[in-house]
Image (cartoon, rainbow, N blue to C red):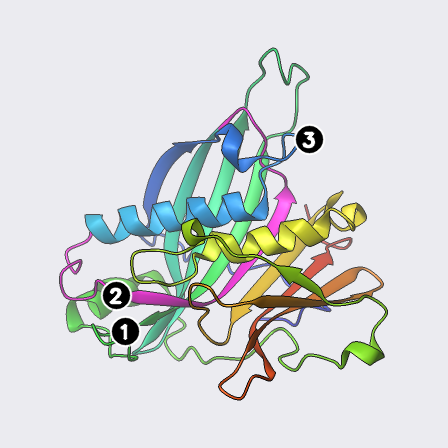
Amino acid sequence: MTSTGEYGPLSERKSGARFFAGEYRVRTGDVDQDMRVRLDGVARYLQDVANDNIAAVTFADTDPFWIIRRTVIDVIEPLTWPSDLRMERWCGALSTRWTNMRVRIVGETQTNRFNPEPRPNGLVETEAFWINVNASGMPSRISDGALDLLVQMTDEHRLRWKSMNPGTAPSVEDIDLPDREHVLRITDFDPFKHLNNAAYLEIVEDELVDHPDLIDGPHRAVIEYLRPIAPATPVTVRRSRDGERLLMWILVPDDDGALAVASTVSVTTLANAAL
């Protein structure tokens, strides 16, 4: 895995490896005013295909609990509305407690009266670092049955964590952009009182309004989750623009009231991506 300052294509699927496939459709609630599927929309599709994948496999009862540590989203060609989506999901690397799950999203574009001009088909490549946890939320060994299935998909069986984003937020005095507040809604949380992954990326989309050049062409978004955010928690967003890269730190009060990093985000252009 490369850092955010470099572009390295995500791993290809092992030849002949099995994968899970699902068909979905872009809805207007997931697109912006330019008919582009937003990053939070991509996150919702990834959640849907992951849930459908787990429900379809034999180890759904033995390994039902997973949390995401990081998501990488490479928008090679944006998904747009209207489109039909084909999503393919497989394991790109793993260890005994976590996996890198790859999802390829291909959009077959269509036209309608609201978006009548022909457009390229969409292509988004993603990779998520998933940790298997037990009912108490603690990292847990993946069951033998799940490992038997997953190891067939990849030759990388010694996956280790390496952060891609700067984990320490700079002092607000050292950057040009001021902090801003973000108000969370109760609908941003799931039944387990976890902030939904899509809700984090809604914060990113709020910021990208002021940086449209970053998403005009191929781009990579990387979000890493460092600590949970509970309902009613005040959220502060710190951000810094450095050339073709936007960095964001989503901050929440710690036990002493000081701001602590809950999540880090980078959005980078992929000018040198091989299309």
**Comes first in the chain, label 2 or label 1:** 2
Which structural element holds mark 2? loop
Please name the residue shown 34% across and 38% down the image: 22
| Within-10-Å neighbours for mark 1: few <14, some 14–19, many 20+ | some
The circle drawn on residue 133 is 1
Check if mark 2's residue and mark 1's residue have beta carbons within 8 Å.
yes
Q: Give the quarter of the image for residue 24.
A: top left
Numbered range of the magenta stretch = 57-83
Judged left or right of residue 7, residue 103 is left
Q: Which residue is mark 2?
A: 65
Check if mark 1's residue and mark 3's residue have beta carbons within 8 Å.
no
The disc labelled 1 sits on which kind of residue?
Val
The circle drawn on residue 34 is 3
**Comes first in the chain, label 2 or label 3:** 3
Q: Give the quarter of the image for residue 179.
A: bottom right
**Comes first in the chain, label 1 or label 3:** 3
The percent position of residue 245, horizontal first and vertical second, equals: 76, 62
The disc labelled 3 sits on which kind of residue?
Asp
Q: Residue furthest top?
A: 113
Which structural element holds mark 3? loop
Judged left or right of residue 43, residue 237 is right
Which structural element holds mark 1? loop
| Within-10-Å neighbours for mark 2: few <14, some 14–19, many 20+ | some
Which quadrant of the figure contains the N terminus? bottom right
Which quadrant of the figure contains the C terminus? top right
The percent position of residue 220, horizontal first and vertical second, equals: 65, 56
Please name the residue shown 38% across and 50% down the image: 47
